[in-house]
Amino acid sequence: MPGPLPGAALVLRPSLRRYLSTVKWSLLPLVVLLAALLVRGGGFGAAVSLVVIALASSIGPAWFRRAAITVTPSELAVTGLLRTRRVPRDAVGSIVTAALPRTHQNSRSLAHLYVLDRGGRRIARMTGARWVEDDMRRLMATLGVETHKLGRLASARALAGRYPHAVGLLERYPVLAGALVVVPAVAAIFAISMEMSS
């Protein structure tokens, strides 16, 4: 049975400070690519770089201002940038926690929490890059459902082997997520360089 929820709803929000402290070095390749586009691309490259920077500096903070996980006596609501997903509290089946490496297998591990429905499908996810562990513990205590603590795993793919509906494709293959950012940027730099040299 769900745990007690005295008074108002529990509202948890991600931590921008946590995010900036954990991902600062992973943003370096993108900064280098934007700098290369700015230098090699002339006016058009500068415009593209400024647009990308403007989008990143507005969408990221907007998500952190809007995102939330809310628990009321009757429902669990997960709010993202564009929408809020609501499920009845009695649809929550279990919670899975694991420590997953931030990038490669030997990198520092961060806490991850997955709220699953009774069919094992993910309802909500909290990652240590965006959420503090105290809030993860508060969510577990408030929901009061069965919790599976897996400890440190080698990768998100290892977690997907046990809970296939909890882990998305880009989580299983982080190289693919990086390629979606890097490949278009490199292609743009190459195309602009060719245009400028012709």
Image (cartoon, rainbow, N blue to C red):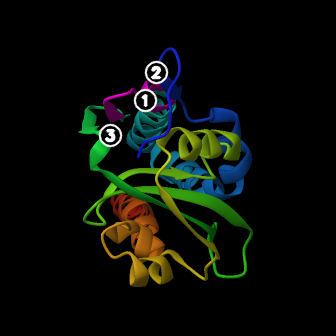
Residue 67 counted in the magenta span: yes
Asked if labels 1 and 2 touch by Cβ distance under 8 angstroms, the answer is yes
Above or below 57: residue 96: below
- 15 or 126, nearer to the observer: 126
Crowding around mark 3 (Cα neighbors within 10 Å: few <14, some 14 to 19, many 20+) is some
Is 38 placed left or right of 117 in the picture?
right
Q: Mark 3 points at which residue?
A: 89
Q: What residue type is disc 3 on?
A: Arg
Which residue appears at 28% of the width and 31% of the height?
Answer: 82
Question: Where residue 70 is drawn, which disc sits there?
Answer: 1
Q: Distance between the residues labelled 1 and 3?
A: 11 Å
Q: SS at mark 1?
A: strand
Which residue appears at 42% of the width and 76% of the height?
Answer: 173
Q: Which of marks 2 and 1 is nearer the N terminus?
A: 2
Q: SS at mark 2?
A: loop
Q: SS at mark 3?
A: helix
Q: Distance between the residues labelled 2 and 1?
A: 7 Å
Q: What residue type is disc 1 on?
A: Thr
- 132 or 54, nearer to the observer: 132
Asked if labels 3 and 1 touch by Cβ distance under 8 angstroms, the answer is no
Identify the magenta region: 62-77
